[in-house]
């Protein structure tokens, strides 16, 4: 399964003229991940800028393009946790949780949220608390399941 880091690494290492050769699995991940869609958009904008530079100056070789891409990557990519605000939209929450928006739609009724100006919003601290509670409940259920399995094996 493809994750966000693989998408990010692909874009960092990808020479501009091969952007259309993005593997199908990466394209599918990007379609379902808001954070990776934003990353792809930033790199497409970078590719356009590099193309403009190449048109104005001498043709840039692949090594120079790769060096520029890596340097820009360092400057434009801050850790995702810093980019997350306390109040999030459903799309921002899905990106933060690293799940497709459709998956969020399936569990939104269980999540702590509120309505603001007719829009659903999520408070990050409440979602973190909710996640911790779910983790604890899952750990308890899993421990009970494993104990029952051990008893049956005896």
Image: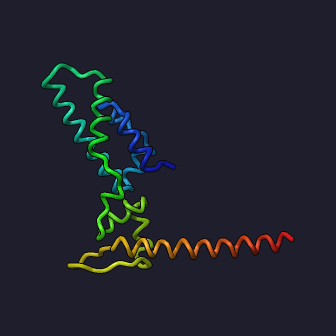
Q: In the displayed structure, does residue 134 sit left or right of residue 153?
A: left
Please report the residue visible at 57 percent of the width from the left and 76 percent of the height from the top.
137
Please report the residue visible at 16 percent of the width from the left and 31 percent of the height from the top.
52
| Residue 92, image x, y percentages | 32, 63
Toward the viewer: 36 or 150? 150
Q: Is 87 rendered above or below residue 115?
A: above
Q: Quadrant of residue 112?
A: bottom left
Q: Is 17 rendered above or below residue 116?
A: above
The residue most toward the top is: 58
Toward the viewer: 135 or 40? 135
Q: In the displayed structure, does residue 70 sit left or right of residue 1?
A: left
Toward the viewer: 74 or 30? 74
Please report the residue visible at 32 percent of the width from the left and 62 percent of the height from the top.
84
The residue most toward the left is: 56
| Residue 134, image x, y percentages | 52, 74
Q: Quadrant of residue 71?
A: top left
Q: Which quadrant holds the C terminus? A: bottom right
| Residue 61, image x, y percentages | 28, 21
| Residue 55, image x, y percentages | 15, 25
In the rendered view, how is the structure colored?
rainbow
């Amino acid at each position: 399964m493809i994750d966000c880091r693989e998408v990010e690494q692909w874009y960092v290492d990808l020479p501009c003229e091969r952007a259309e050769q993005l593997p199908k699995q990466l394209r599918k991940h990007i379609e379902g991940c808001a954070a990776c869609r934003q990353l792809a958009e930033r790199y497409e904008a970078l590719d356009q800028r590099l193309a403009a530079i190449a048109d104005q100056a001498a043709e840039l070789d692949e090594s120079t393009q790769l060096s520029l891409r890596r340097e820009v990557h360092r400057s434009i990519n801050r850790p995702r946790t810093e980019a997350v605000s306390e109040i999030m939209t459903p799309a921002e929450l899905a990106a933060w949780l690293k799940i497709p928006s459709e998956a969020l739609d399936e569990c939104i009724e269980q999540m702590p949220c509120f309505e603001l100006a007719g829009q659903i919003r999520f408070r990050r601290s409440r979602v973190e608390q909710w996640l911790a509670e779910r983790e604890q409940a899952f750990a308890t259920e899993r421990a009970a399941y494993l104990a029952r399995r051990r008893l049956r094996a005896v």
